[in-house]
Amino acid sequence: MQPTTATARPTVFAPGQALDAFTSFVDTSEMEPAVTRTLRIGGGFLNTLADPNDPKSFIYAFDNNAFPSTALIQPRLNSVEEWTIVNENNDEHPIHIHVNDFQVTDLSDPVAGTDFGPQPWGQDNANTPAPLYDASGNVSKPGVLTLRTKFQDCTGTYVIHCHRLNHGDNGLMAIVNVIPEVSSYAVATADGRITVHDGADDSVMAEVTPFVGATTAPSVAMADVDGDQVLDLIAGAGPGSSPTVVIYSGASMGDAGPFGTELRRFSAFRDDMTSGLSVAAADIDGDSVADIVVGSGPGSNSHVKVFASASASAEGRTAGAPDVFSEFAPYGDSTAGVTVATGMVDDMSGRSSIVTAPGPGVPAEIRTWRFDLYTVTAAGRRAGVAEKNDHAPHLADLGIDIGGGADSSQLPMLTSSFMAFDGTYTGGASLAVGWLAGTEGGAQRVIVGQLGDEGQVRVFATPSALEAGPEMYLKSPQAHTTQLSFTRIGSFTPFDAPGGVRVSATSTVNGADLIVGSSLDQGASRYQFARSSQDPRMLQATRMGNVSGARGPAVGSLGGA
Ligand SMILES: [Cu+2]
């Protein structure tokens, strides 16, 4: 190819002239951070958590814990946070943060004796200097890196980690999960009404009645269905109505306020299936917006459908149902109905799973389901890894036939199965997923409430800081498994009168609180969770108060994010 010829044209800039080029830099130094956090890089190496057969292997720790047991960092979209990385380890640690660039506002290097203030540029990697030691080898002055970030453009999960990869790989990493500006949750009552609450103060943002004439509570969920980073409301018809799903926009549109505009209304199953839906929503198909997950009610073959939501707002409410990404029968030929929830309960995949519970009449066996979106490599195929989402053979090995409609190549992997209560409890379960006590790290928790009996609530999770430590560094990557191991980390009975409960989580900057509704006459309450002082492997629930403004004394269903 011949070089082209061109004539250079000098451009004269006046002093101070704006160049109008894109820059990710936001000068946060004069702003007031919404949240300040400290991440301490420990001096010790937690050698007991490393593989004893590998003499080079040791663990690096944030606050004495290695990933994934490091504290969740959960900023709100468009907020500014300040994080101080305090280094008491004998090495330097270049800290790299994905997605949003940051501004260094203080850099204190005690070995060099330098201390720099705010830097007028953005970056995605900055060194945390080594500490200074006294004569007896103790840290006399740590290295300190202070940075500020404005969380812009998008919600979602990424990581902060040491950019010396053997440090990051060995635990010096934490999850950053940017959540919407408002963490809303919905309370539905038996008169068919739904109130949507602002999770910051439980105040009522909106009230809607999606199914005119209904005399049962719809199922509710919150998720960003249309990609505007605002939580939308998903409502599924309760028992006695045709199996309709309605989506309301969480953003104001035209003259309508939040949740005042229907984005879509469609039928999830055959019209004669009128035993009530269960709805949830999360990104399952990998297009970054939430998909609608619907569980069928009791009576017919229990069924889950995943509707791809990419076109949820594009065509409006007359467009019919979105495309079906997958459908399956999570409990084989059971007709008990199925309750669904979604969330990142699986830190081996890092993506949202679908969590299911059967309806009343059978024991509450919880199952978790994972879709993968990658294409298996040749080496993986030789090792027997299933083709993308083609898990029918794996499920057949387990003796489970989950059907799959027309496309058996689009089935999830069963990643766990456990009993929420003992086998004699068959009253049905309310399900939620949330990061209760997120400062203990780990993946999101599965919360199960009894729809009957005394209304007990139990919390289950894969390993977090509540365990002695993450076992993953004791094993080679080849020993890692897709199968999850849930243990019970919390248990309490929120209302003193017997009767069922409904559960939902609502996110905070450190994790999530629990909203519990009484199916009798005691309304809804909010609980916070923290590590129990009696048993360090368990969480303790603390009641924060009533949810004011929830309509009606009896709660039919709850949903939040
Ligand atoms: Cu490092």
Image: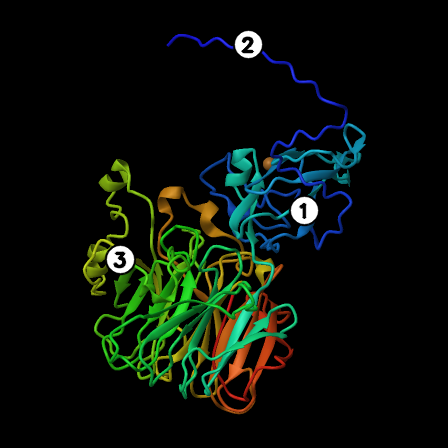
The residue labelled by disc 1 is 40
Up the image or down, 78 lies above or below 540; here it is above
Q: Please, is residue 303 above or below residue 179 in the view? A: below
Q: Nearer the viewer, mark 1 or mark 3?
A: 3
SS at circle 2:
loop
Callout 3: SS: loop
Rate crowding at label 3 as few (under 14), some (14 to 19) or many (20 or more) other CA atoms within 10 Å: many
**Amino acid type of the residue that numbered disc 2 sits on in the rendered structure:** Thr
Would you say the residues marked 3 and 2 are in contact, meaning their CB atoms lie under 8 Å apart?
no
| Three-letter residue code for mark 3 | Leu
Of callouts 1 and 3, the N-terminal one: 1
In what element is the residue under mark 1? strand
Labels 1 and 2: the sequence-earlier one:
2
- The front one of 271 and 84 is 271
- Which residue is label 3 attached to? 411
Q: What residue type is labelled 1?
A: Arg
- Left or right? Give the position of 66 relative to 403: right
Query: In 3D space, how far apart are the residues under numbered discs 3 and 2 (Cα atoms)?
Result: 60 Å
Say if disc 3 is inside 8 Å of ligand 1.
Answer: no
The image shows residue 460, relative to residue 10, as above or below, that is below
**How far apart, in angstroms, are the residues tagged by discs 1 and 3?**
42 Å
Which picture quadrant has residue 27? top right
Q: Is mark 2 within 8 Å of ligand 1?
A: no
For the N terminus, give its image quadrant.
top left
Is residue 154 visible in the rendered image? The answer is: yes
Q: Nearer the viewer, mark 3 or mark 2?
A: 2
Camera-side residue of 51 and 264: 264
Q: Name the residue under label 2.
A: 7
Residue 87 in the image, given as x and y percentages of width and height: 69, 40
Percent x, y of residue 384: 23, 45
Instruction: From the viewer's side, name the closer residue of 218 and 511.
Output: 218
